């Protein structure tokens, strides 16, 4: 890319184009009353089995529902789509324009825990291809070939009604089946704008996300004002306890943004 201003212009254009299709995405997953359009799984005997609130199941079905609309977005805006080869590859979808400019988009879904927060998400690895930006391992194209890295996210609420997964329904019962999720809100943000300064839950080597709904919608995470360069530098050199131990360090140089800023001052 020629310069940062041109890069930012391209990223803004892509984000705006994607946001213009949010209504189409919502219509693909939601009824007029705000319920999920999916009621369950059907077999060849026309028996319908209700869906659990398992986040992995919901996430995969959501991807399948959105895929035709995402294809429509690509076609209308002149992008070629390249899907990830394997489940653990990054990103979910790569978009390329006529000049071979590439954009990475990960599809993420999460549920509301209360009126202001969600369960949280992970935003991709901070090791491997993230650090070796010429690497082709577990990534569709090398990381540094992408002009921008985006999250197309959907926030939903779990139903407060009891869902008995033992029940088997018929087609005539379709409208009486409770949708396990409802009330969808979509957002599009650059990854760095909604990233935290700590990994996702557990021992994962994935970047964690903010959990406040307004920060997700508005893109006002802790790196938003610092910029993508700081986000990249922070996570390229971030070490977990085990990673620090593996390189004979007593502890990691920093564990959060405050310590990172102090560490950078000491190095000057």
Image (cartoon, rainbow, N blue to C red):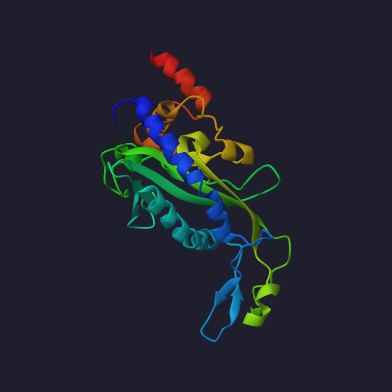
Count of numbered labels shown in the rendering: 0
Residue 13 at least partly seen: yes
Q: Name the residue rendered at 55%, 33% in the picture.
A: 221
Residue drawn 32% across the image and 50% down it: 138
Say left or right for 240 vs 158.
Answer: left
Position of residue 225 measured from the top left corner of the image (x, y, whole percent): 51, 25
Residue 132 visible somewhere in the drawing = no
Tell me if residue 28 comes above or below residue 10 in the rendering: below
Q: Nearer the viewer, residue 248 or 149?
A: 149
Residue 151 horizontal/vertical position (percent): 47, 44
181 relative to 99 in the view: left or right: right
Tell me what residue is drawn at x 73 percent, y 67 percent. 162
> In what quadrant of the picture does the N terminus appear?
top left
Q: Position of residue 242 (x, y in %)?
A: 42, 39
Residue 42: x, y in percent? 55, 78
Position of 87 relative to 127 (above/below): below
Question: What residue do we see at 39% from left, 28% from top?
Answer: 233
Work out which residue is located at the far right of the displayed protein and give it: 161
């Amino acid at each position: 890319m020629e310069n940062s201003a041109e890069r930012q212009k391209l990223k803004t254009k892509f984000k705006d184009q994607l946001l213009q299709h949010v209504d189409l995405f919502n219509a693909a997953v939601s009824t007029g009353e705000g319920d999920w359009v999916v009621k369950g799984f059907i077999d060849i005997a026309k028996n319908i089995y209700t869906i659990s609130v398992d986040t992995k199941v919901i996430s995969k079905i959501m991807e399948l529902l959105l895929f035709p609309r995402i294809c429509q977005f690509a076609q209308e805006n002149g992008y070629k789509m390249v899907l990830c080869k394997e489940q653990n590859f990054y990103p979910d979808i790569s978009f390329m324009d006529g000049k071979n400019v590439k954009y990475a988009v990960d599809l993420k879904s999460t549920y509301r825990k209360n009126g202001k927060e969600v369960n949280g998400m992970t935003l991709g690895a901070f090791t491997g291809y993230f650090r070796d930006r010429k690497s082709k391992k577990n990534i569709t194209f090398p990381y540094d070939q992408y002009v921008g890295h985006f999250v197309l996210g959907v926030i939903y609420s779990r139903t407060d009604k009891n869902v008995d997964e033992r029940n088997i329904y018929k087609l005539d019962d379709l409208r009486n089946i409770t949708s396990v999720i409802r009330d969808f809100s979509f957002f599009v943000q650059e990854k760095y704008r909604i990233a935290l300064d700590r990994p996702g839950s557990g021992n994962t080597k994935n970047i964690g996300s903010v959990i406040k709904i307004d920060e997700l919608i508005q893109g006002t995470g802790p790196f938003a004002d610092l910029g993508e360069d700081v986000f990249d530098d922070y996570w390229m050199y971030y070490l977990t306890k085990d990673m620090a131990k593996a390189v004979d360090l007593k502890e990691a140089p920093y564990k959060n943004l405050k310590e990172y800023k102090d560490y950078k001052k000491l190095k000057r």
